[in-house]
Amino acid sequence: MGTRERKLRERSAREMLFIETAQDLIRHDGLLNLRMSRLADACDYATGTLYQHFASKEDLLLAIATEDLKRRAAAFARLPDLPLGTRDRMLAVILTDIDFGQRHPDYFRLVQYVSTEVIWDSASAERRERLLEEGAPISQAVSRIVSAAIEAQDLPRSAGLRPIEIAAGPWCLNTGMHTLIHAQGLLEAYAVREPYDLLLHHSHALLNGLGWRPLAKLDDSDALARQNERVRLLLDSDPTPPASTA
């Protein structure tokens, strides 16, 4: 290994140490209590070394979100090729995101925070572009499912809408419910006790509204539960490969 390659690997390993330690601090102390000086101390590095990797706290937060997004994208990569009908593949998208949200509860809070104008505009263009690049495979995977559904005539063509624009409906519903779930105490205030079940019900209703066949029987909760479980079992039988760290 040459000197340059060794230094690049050392830098990459050091950056991952900063990111993973920051995640631990956020879980322990909360997102708003993250301090660059404390992070540097926890990693046994000078604060100046930390700033050589991340020009600002905002850049660090986007880097953390980007690493989580890689894991999320890895979970989506296989979905367009699952041995399921197109509607069940879209259901697999929703179930996969539910599973991801339960495994990584800090992710949706962090993404919501870094997407605010004050954080996003303060981060460097490079970090913003990297985050968007890592998220692109997710929209591409879902668009492939929509395109396959149109091609199979499971889903009527929506005049003037591209597959990604059709996919925006389930995306908005999914993102909105996760935002509510991770807003501390909000759903509890309205006695919404099973938000993920509610997300699945509304997702079936939305897919019905799009005319995505076979239509679900919304008044048969047992049939919906069986369908959800059948798709979930298939997902569980074929674990998601780890995200690339390259």
Image: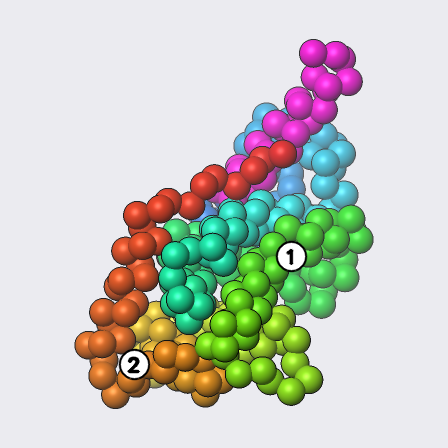
Query: Hey, what amino acid is under mark 2?
Result: Ala
Tag 2 secondary structure: loop
What's the residue at 23%, 80% (across, down)? 221
What's the residue at 56%, 38% (across, down)? 244
What's the residue at 61%, 27% (across, down)? 13
Camera-nearest residue between 219 and 177 = 219
Query: Hey, what amino acid is under mark 1?
Result: Ala
Extreme residue toward the front, this view:
152
Decide if residue 223 is on the left or right side of residue 35: left
Residue pointed to by mark 2: 191
Within the image, what quadrant is residue 31 found in? bottom right
Decide if residue 90 is on the left or right side of residue 221: right
Question: Can residue 168 be seen in the rendering of this structure?
Answer: no
Pinpoint residue 95: horizontal percent, then vertical percent: 38, 63
Residue pointed to by mark 1: 136
Sequence-earlier tag: 2 or 1 = 1
Label 2 crowd bin: few (<14), some (14–19), many (20+), radius 10 Å:
few
Q: Main secondary structure of the magenta part?
A: helix
Camera-nearest residue between 14 and 142 = 142
Camera-nearest residue between 29 and 7 = 7
- Please state the extent of the stretch shown in magenta in the rendering: 1-24
Pinpoint residue 99: horizontal percent, then vertical percent: 38, 57
Question: Can residue 19 be seen in the rendering of this structure?
Answer: yes
- In the displayed structure, 77 sits above or below 195; it is above
